[in-house]
Image (cartoon, rainbow, N blue to C red):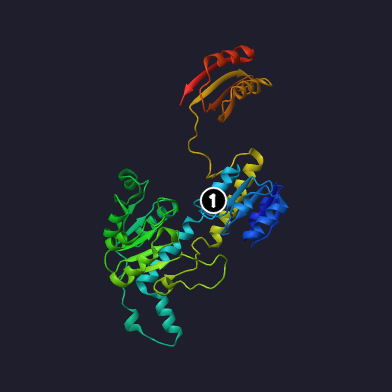
Amino acid sequence: MRVLIADKFEQSGQDGLKAAGCEIHYQPGLKDEALARAVADLRPDVLVVRSTAVAEPALIPGALKLVVRAGAGYNTIDVATASRRGIYVSNCPGKNSVAVAELAFGLILALDRRIPDGVASLREGKWNKAEFSKARGLFGRTLGLIGTGQIGREMIPRARAFGLKVVAWSRSLTPESAAALGVEYKASALEVAGAADIVSVHLALNAKTRGLIGAEFFEAMQPGAYFINTARAEAIDQDALSRAIHEKGIRAALDVFANEPPGGTGEFAGAIAKEVYGTHHIGASTDQAQEAIAAETVRIITTFQNTGKVPNVVNLAKSTPATCSLIVRHLDRPGVLASVLDFISAARINVQEMENIVFEGAEAAVARINLENEPPESLLTQIRESNSNILELGIIRL
C-alpha cells in the first residue's frame, strides 16, 4: 500500500508503516497545488495529514482510497468531496486529549497568576512583587466546561486536584451522565456561563457549534471571569470576546485564533492577540500525544490494508434511502449472491448496503441486502425459483 505523508509525522509512525510493508513517501510541507500534484503523480492509496488542508483538487486525481487526519479534528478536509469520490476519511480521536487538557490548565494558571506578564516584566529588568503577588486563587471556585468529549472529560480530574467545582454542558450530556462524571449538569451553555468563574471550551467544530459562543454567552458570564479556548476558533465570536474583555473585564487565554497562518510559521496580525494570553495552536503538540497519534495512524492504515475496514471513519452515511432489507438464507456456494444481484439490477432497484454472514463450517450463510425500493412478490418468486442453493428469501421493511 502506497502512503503519502504530507505533514510532519513521527519517525515511529513511519517505521511502523514500513514494517507493515507500506511504501512511504514522506513529503512534509505539501499544500494546495503542490499537494494535488503529488497525489496525481504518486497515486497513493492513503494520504496522511495533520494541519494541511485537503481540498477538492487533491481528492480528484489518482487512486486515493483513504485520508487520515493525524489528529482529532477533520475540518481541514473536504469531506463532502471525499464522500462523493468514495474515499474514506478517518481521524485519531482522543489521542491528544491529555495534552490539550494540560495546556488548558496551564492557561488557567497563567491567567490567575499573570505568569506571562510577570515573566515579561522580569526580563525587562523590573521587579514588581507588589503588582504580581495579587491573584484570586483557584481553590473552591467553579470551572465551567463547554463540551464533555474526551478532552472535556480529561479536565474533570485535573479540576478536582485543584479543588475546583465543575459544572458542564454538552449536547450529548444528560443529568445522569453528568452525575456519573461527578459534575453538575447545566441545561445550556448560557447556564454554564452564568455559573462559572472559569469557562473552558472543548467543542468539536460542526454546523451546530460554529459561532456558538457569542455575545449572549459573554453577556451571561460573570464580570472578571476567565475564558479559555483550546478547541476551535470558529466556535467563538472573536469580536464579541474582544468586547467582553473591554466591557466586562473578562480575562481570556486562547490557543486557537481566526485567520491563523496556514503553515508552522508566519506573520500574525490578529488584534485579539494583544488582548489575551495566547499560544500558537499547540494544544496537541507534546511528544506523548504525537507518539500516540502516530501509533493510531499506523493502526488505521494497517487495519485498512489487512481487512478493508477503516477504524474511526467519519464519512459513512448514518442513514440511506433504503426502504427494506432483502434477507437471503443460502448455501455458501459460488454465484448465489451474484444471481440475486442480477435479478435486482435487471429490475432497476438500487442496492444501498449489503453484508453476508457465514456460519461455522462455511456451509450456509445469510445475506442482508438493503434496497432503495421494495421488490414485487413476482420478482421474489423468480429469485427463489432460480437457484436451488437459496434456502429462504424474505423482506424486512425499514
Residue 385 shown left or right of residue 258 in the figure: right
Which residue appears at 66% of the width and 40% of the height? 306
Q: For this rendering, which residue is in front, 340 or 146?
A: 340
Furthest residue toward bottom? 125
Amino acid type indicated by mark 1: Cys
Q: Is residue 368 above or below residue 22?
A: above
Tell me how many marks there are: 1
* Residue 121 picture quarter: bottom left
Q: For this rendering, which residue is in front, 164 or 369?
A: 369
Which residue in the protein does label 1 denote? Answer: 92
Residue 61: percent from left, percent from top: 67, 49
Residue 218: percent from left, percent from top: 31, 63
Residue 103: percent from left, percent from top: 45, 64
Q: Is residue 117 above or below residue 33?
A: below
Q: Is residue 140 visible?
A: no
Position of the C terminus by quadrant: top left
Q: Is residue 380 above or below residue 270?
A: above
Which residue appears at 33% of the width and 82% of the height? 131
Which residue appears at 53% of the width and 73% of the height? 267
Q: Is residue 61 visible?
A: yes
Q: Is residue 183 above or below residue 305?
A: below
Residue 371 shown left or right of residue 21 in the figure: left
Q: Label 1: few (<14), some or many (≥20) within 10 Å?
A: many
* Numbered disc 1: secondary structure: loop
Residue 374: percent from left, percent from top: 51, 22
